[in-house]
Amino acid sequence: MPATFVIFGASGDLTSRKLIPALYKLFCKKRLRDGLRVVGFSRSPYSHQQWRSELAESTARFAGEDFDPDVWQQFESELFYHAGNIGEPADFERLRDFLAGIEKGVASPRVYYMATAPNFYEAAVDQLGRNGFADETDAPRRVVIEKPFGFDLASAKQLNHAIHRTFQEHQVYRIDHYLGKETVQNLLVLRFANTIFEPVWNRNYIDHVQITVAEEVDVGKRAGYYDKAGVMRDMFQNHLLQLLMISAMEPPVRYEADAIRNEKVKVLHAVRRLTAEDVAVDTLRGRYDGYTKSKDIAADSRTATFAAVKLWIDNWRWQGVPFYLRSGKAMSCRTTQIVIQFREPPQRLFATERNNLCDANRLIIQVQPAEGIQLHFQTKVPDAGMKLRTTDLNFNYQSEFGKSMPEAYERLLLDALEGDASLFARADEVEAAWRVCDPILKAWQESDQPPLLTYEPSVWGPEESAEWMRSQGREWFDTCPVLA
Ligand SMILES: NC(=O)c1ccc[n+]([C@@H]2O[C@H](COP(=O)([O-])OP(=O)(O)OC[C@H]3O[C@@H](n4cnc5c(N)ncnc54)[C@H](OP(=O)(O)O)[C@@H]3O)[C@@H](O)[C@H]2O)c1
């Protein structure tokens, strides 16, 4: 039985840039086992054909060489547009009749995708409930909620509560597209399908972990939204904490949604809460020079576009191992990487040029732009006495498997259609993530400590960030993508 995929926010950027290209590629790869109808809902007054034509053009642009006009023709015949306003209850009644029409009265599995501004999530879900859209008596019904999920802990709890008035937790898919990336999933494989990593994946061998999400772009057209959110809400609460959980979690008892999510959420529960005093010394925040020049940003804005945070995970595996998380806009380059910095050997047998941690082993998991893994280790330079040099072993997904990497949304949309929630956040998980971020945001706002630093665009954040690491006997791994 074909499923129906209903997109709220059908005329928006996410729909044209990510959702439709991902569904189209799944269609091309014949992954949509039982077929699929896509229904778009937003206020713009398109006809079916106008919406299809716009999406043909944008999909050709975003899907690149994967776009085949003949295949698109088949795909678009199942694209439908239904104009409506989330604020108008009558529009949902019309949508209900419209869906019944295209489904020919046969109860079909449905996914409702919230690709609209977050302030509409609650109203849209409420209307879905009132019109019986969540009723699973005859077929599964799921809702996908985009990020950001809440603005702080209180609003995230309220949103969870509001969604649970209509949908049960097993029907709710909170998306973080980082989890759809092959390398992030491969981190689970690396850790739990190999025996050589797990014995060293702990406080006995690891000095610290660095997780960096650096963006080369500045806030650009998103200035209005970004100024209200800032780096902590935009990056830490979701992407960085997701990467932290996957890096630090214990092996799940089974590879299934709740077993995985149970282990992930335990990591967040073990993260030591930061007091205002901790925030002043264990976090840094900055803003690139020129940020307030954008017309959508208030001249007296105090929004941070860069932050670095040191977190401790109080459990047996990680006691005493700091996790350094940092993210920024207008940085040197676009890269997302997890650096596992191992300890130095207990005895120094060989003289190296730099006697410090940089000579110790390092495992780099590069999430983007290229996906892959690099292991750093010491080797002897040939014919140079006992001179040592750091060298590396590389694993690059693209060159290893020789085909283009799937977009994260492909995997996640397919999982949502097939009812696998393993790579989606659970209600308690998003709330636990806010419990980590809220005290930092509160301290920044109330005590204005640490100070908001300024950095030149196209560097690795404020200079003080490097000094902060050096004062702890460590160094940031400031290398633009290690894998091309
Ligand atoms: N764009 C991305 O790459 C991206 C990435 C990650 C997450 N997200 C999240 O995805 C969501 C959508 O982002 P976006 O960039 O696509 O935003 P957008 O381009 O502004 O699109 C918003 C959509 O909502 C519709 N809409 C607005 N008011 C409506 C109403 N009253 N009733 C029905 N539809 C309404 C708009 O269409 P009409 O004006 O025609 O009604 C439009 O289709 C946001 O929560 C964002 O945070 C986006």
Image: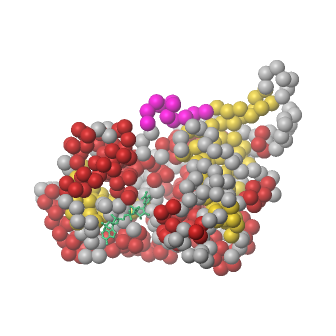
In the shown orientation, is residue 324 left or right of residue 130? right
Note whether residue 434 is visible: no
| Residue name at image x 75 percent, y 50 percent | 475
| Residue name at image x 31 percent, y 63 percent | 8
Q: In this view, does 320 lie above or below 131?
A: above
Location of the C terminus (image quadrant): top right
Please check the rendered image and state whether residue 398 is part of the magenta-colored stretch, yes or no.
yes
Q: What stretch is highlighted in magenta?
A: 394-404
Could you say which quadrant of the image residue 325 lies in?
Answer: bottom right
| Residue name at image x 26 percent, y 40 percent | 69
Q: In this view, does 457 lie above or below 201?
A: below
User: Where in the image, quadrant-wise, is ligand 1 located?
Assistant: bottom left
Please check the rendered image and state whether residue 214 is part of the magenta-colored stretch, yes or no.
no
- Please state the horizontal and vertical placement of residue 269, each as a whole percent of the image: 59, 63
In the shown orientation, is residue 278 left or right of residue 34? right
- Please state the horizontal and vertical placement of residue 378, each as a whole percent of the image: 75, 32
Residue found at the very far top of the displayed protein: 383
| Residue name at image x 16 percent, y 63 percent | 98
Q: Looking at the picture, tell me which residue is in the foreground, 351 or 459.
A: 459
